[in-house]
Amino acid sequence: MLDVQGISKHWRSPGGGQRLLLKELNLQVPQGQTVALLGPSGSGKSTLLKIIAGLEAPDAGRVLFDGQDITNLPPEQRQFALMFQDFALFPHLSVQDNVAFGLVEQGQRRATARAQAVEMLQRFGLAAHTGARVWQLSGGEQQRVALARALITAPRLLLLDEPFSALDADLRLSLRAEFRQRITASGMAVLWVTHDEAEARSVGARGFRVVAGALQPLW
């Protein structure tokens, strides 16, 4: 279980000014549950994800997972997966090697990782695109590749940062249902950040809004 305790964070401008983004924020995400986080741009949602992922340090507070304090643990040791709104795929790699990347980083032999990537791509209906470059795929296909890459490493926690904001409305609806099904089947803890309340309610067992740096329960 993810357990965020008393996280505070200020945004600091190059000119030396600062603004409070997160104020003594507390959040728990149990295994097998998806929690949705709502709020406008600049409210601190993405900053919270980066703190949980280990990409930014909090000014105060702790991040725990299964009772272990991981606040100062490097990102690569947390066994979390983070999906960005711009997919963050590698344009110079094939679809197969994009999906295999995390396994190779974990120390698996490249041949073994690539074989597992093919199996994952088959599950996602992308087997015909294994040798393609990601820029040759549609936006929906790229997002499926990004999710396949996230899930193949069997992360303890999946962090989604506005995963569908770059897609058109019809595609967002179809992918929303698909992602919900695949994530539920994985049984992992998920924190899903979005500005779309309909999306949040469709995917989240619980939902919160970031208000003045704290979380306001919605359901």
Image: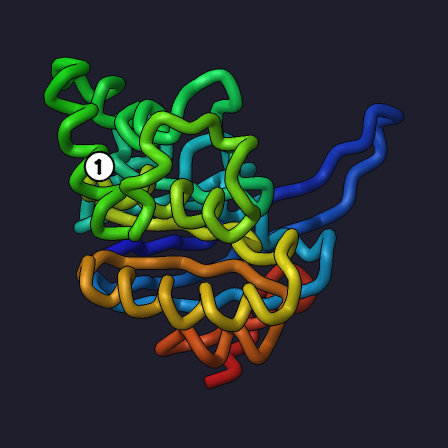
Residue at 47% x, 26% y is 133
Residue 177 relative to residue 148: left or right: right
Q: Quick one: quadrant of the N terminus? A: bottom left
Q: Position of residue 79 (x, y in %)?
A: 25, 36
Outermost residue toward the right?
A: 15
In the foreground, 171 or 202: 171
Residue 68 relative to residue 162: left or right: left
Q: Which residue is mark 1?
A: 153
Residue at 67% x, 41% y is 10
Residue 190 relative to residue 212: left or right: left
Does residue 178 lie above or below 152 as drawn?
below
Residue type, numbered disc 1 = Thr
Does residue 212 lie above or below 148 as drawn?
below
In the foreground, 162 or 189: 162
Residue 138 relative to residue 13: left or right: left
Q: Counting other residues with Cα less than 10 Å from the Cα at mark 1, is it few (<14), some (14-19), or many (20 or more)?
A: many
Does residue 100 lie above or below 218 as drawn?
above
Q: Position of residue 113 (x, y in %)?
A: 17, 24
Q: Is residue 155 visible?
A: no
Q: Position of residue 129 (x, y in %)?
A: 37, 36
Q: Based on the displayed image, in which of its 4 quarters is residue 97 positioned?
A: top left
In the foreground, 36 or 13: 36
Residue at 39% x, 42% y is 145
Q: Is residue 174 visible?
A: yes
Residue at 48% x, 24% y is 90
Q: Position of residue 104 (x, y in %)?
A: 23, 19
Label 1 element class: loop
Does residue 94 lie above or below 216 as drawn?
above
Q: Based on the displayed image, in which of its 4 quarters is residue 2 positioned?
A: bottom left
